Image (cartoon, helix red, strand yellow):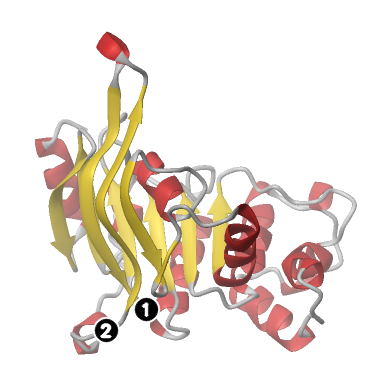
């Protein structure tokens, strides 16, 4: 994706300003190395992500955007600070509790699809539900598959799908459990323009129609323009916060910070 896609922001103006907090962090830091090799990947970040809000995190290479997302998702431990998900601090949470939280309340979309090669698309989508001991809702699976344009491919295995179709299966798998928060790390990086737009529209719908909180890391202003707001990190700190910004505004701001 390398050009503006003219996303719609018409819905976000009517959202209530007092939305509840889904994720929040205070004084968040992550330091790697020691002495002269010390790197402050995340450096004292305060941020709130409201229920039903779609946020894009951007920044130059090495700015800490992926580290910040991994911390917020409980995939990495902070050096200091606090992270709260749905009112519960996850810092110091026991591994079993954190695993259950990630399984039941969080969804993940990454550039690497991580599909099980021996399972069909339908089976891959329903896998998180089965692992939790639940019974998949075929209607929900087919609704998501239809929205993502893969309804006719549900009985195919990953090697029978294109890269874009595999990514959309991964998106459906992340959304099918109706997680409170969806984390997406460069989800459009390997997709063509049309497929990338369809994926971003699905993330918009997850936020606006299903009141899921979406936190996406991206380097692409065209992808970020689909979000309700954009946080731009520089040297591990939030340097800019843009709301309802256009592709041109996001691209210009990124140029200012040297990305």
- Nearer the observer, 71 or 111: 71
For residue 183, above or below residue 135:
above
**Disc 1: CA contacts within 10 A as few (<14), some (14-19) or many (>=20):** many
Decide if residue 240 is on the left or right side of residue 51: left
Q: Which residue is mark 2?
A: 19
The quadrant in which residue 120 appears is bottom right
Please identify the quadrant where the C terminus is shown. top left
Residue 38 drawn at (x, y percent): 29, 19
The quadrant in which residue 152 appears is bottom right
The residue shown at (24%, 59%) is: 47
Decide if residue 51 is on the left or right side of residue 164: left
Q: CA distance from mark 1 to mark 2?
A: 8 Å
Please tell me the numbered disc located at residue 52: 1
The residue shown at (31%, 29%) is: 62
SS at mark 2? Answer: loop
The residue shown at (29%, 23%) is: 39
Q: Cβ–Cβ below 8 Å for labels 1 and 2?
A: yes
């Amino acid at each position: 994706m390398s050009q503006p896609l003219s996303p719609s922001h018409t819905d976000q103006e009517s959202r209530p300003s007092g939305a509840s907090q889904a994720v929040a962090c205070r004084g968040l830091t992550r330091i790697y190395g020691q002495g002269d090799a010390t790197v402050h990947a995340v450096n004292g970040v305060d941020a709130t992500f409201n229920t039903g809000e779609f946020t894009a995190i951007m920044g130059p290479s090495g700015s800490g955007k992926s580290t910040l997302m991994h911390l917020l998702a409980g995939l990495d431990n902070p050096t200091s600070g606090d992270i709260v998900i749905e009112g519960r601090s996850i810092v110091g949470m026991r591994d079993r509790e954190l695993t259950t939280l990630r399984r039941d309340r969080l969804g993940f979309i990454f550039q690497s699809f991580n599909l099980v090669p021996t399972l069909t698309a339908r089976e891959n989508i329903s896998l998180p539900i089965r692992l939790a001991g639940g019974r998949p809702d075929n209607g929900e699976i087919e609704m998501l598959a239809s929205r993502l344009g893969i309804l006719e491919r549900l009985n195919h295995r990953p090697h029978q799908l294109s890269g874009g179709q595999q990514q959309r299966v991964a998106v459906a798998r992340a959304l099918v459990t109706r997680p409170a928060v969806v984390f997406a790390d460069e989800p459009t990086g390997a997709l063509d323009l049309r497929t990338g737009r369809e994926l971003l529209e699905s993330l918009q719908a997850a936020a606006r129609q299903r009141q899921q909180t979406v936190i996406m890391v991206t380097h692409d202003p065209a992808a970020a323009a689909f979000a309700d707001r954009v946080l731009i990190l520089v040297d591990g700190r939030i340097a800019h916060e843009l709301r309802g910004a256009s592709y041109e505004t996001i691209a210009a701001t990124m140029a200012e910070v040297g990305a």
